[in-house]
Amino acid sequence: GQQLNQSPQSMFIQEGEDVSMNCTSSSIFNTWLWYKQDPGEGPVLLIALYKAGELTSNGRLTAQFGITRKDSFLNISASIPSDVGIYFCAGPIQGAQKLVFGQGTRLTINP
Amino acid sequence: GAVVSQHPSWVICKSGTSVKIECRSLDFQATTMFWYRQFPKQSLMLMATSNEGSKATYEQGVEKDKFLINHASLTLSTLTVTSAHPEDSSFYICSARTGQQETQYFGPGTRLLVL
């Protein structure tokens, strides 16, 4: 079945550093979604990508839809303490209404 | 826009009792709602998909008689955990989408603790 492999699983960085994480699959996806989940909360949509090669920004966040349709990247520039959390990539399963999620990247920031 | 609420945000109950969790889309019509379960430090695990006015579709391994889902209106879905046991303790999250849109919007989650 369609699966998403997200890396790295965790990141420990200093405040102010840039962050980069990615999501890959052996299957083609037509949509890539990036969510952030704070402790004890539900995931919040950060960026949605609908077209191969698309590069979309949301403030300090930038995400790209890989040209092969099998990967996506999320970058965070100049990290701040509130960026701490778990970041999930997700994509729709073909022929179904549901999403498949990556395992998540846990971001920790040292002040 | 695209706000989803859940109630309650946390609940503690005794083993053997039933617990109902509500999921509401506040500013859009949710033709499809989803219920997830999340264990600590793990990703989201889909339990079931429900379309308004239809029976829910459960994922493999999820007991439909234990986790009753009702999606009676375009803005409300409920998950009832029947005869709850300690192993049902978890973080339950709903999401909603409208039409054929693939993007799901999540509620804040409900933490259930069964004693």
Image (spheres, coloured by chain):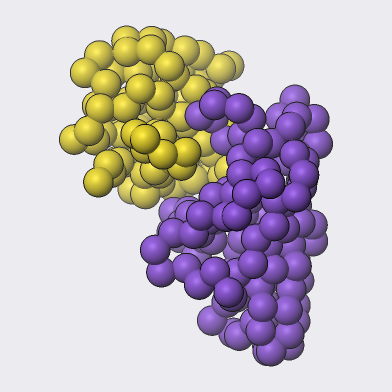
Chain colours: A yellow, B purple
Tell me which residue sits at (41%, 27%) in the image. A32
At which x and y percent is residue B45?
46, 57
Tell me which residue sits at (58%, 16%) in the image. A59
Tell me which residue sits at (32%, 13%) in the image. A52
Relative to B112, A90 lies left or right: left
Q: Which of A69 and A5 is in front in this view?
A: A69
Q: Quadrant of the C terminus of chain B?
A: bottom right
Q: Which of A88 and A101 is in front in this view?
A: A101
Q: Which of B13 and A61 is in front in this view?
A: B13
Residue B104 sits in quarter: top right
The answer, for residue A21, to whether it is visible in the render is yes
Looking at the image, residue B1 lies above or below residue B57: above
At which x and y percent is residue B56?
57, 55
At which x and y percent is residue A5?
27, 42
Residue A6 sits in quarter: top left
Q: Residue furthest front?
A: B54
Looking at the image, residue B69 lies above or below residue A18: below
Relative to A47, B8 lies left or right: right
Residue A54 sits in quarter: top left
Looking at the image, residue B28 lies above or below residue B57: above
Looking at the image, residue B71 lies above or below residue B96: below
Q: Which of B17 and A67 is in front in this view?
A: B17
At which x and y percent is residue A94?
34, 34
The answer, for residue A81, to whether it is visible in the render is no
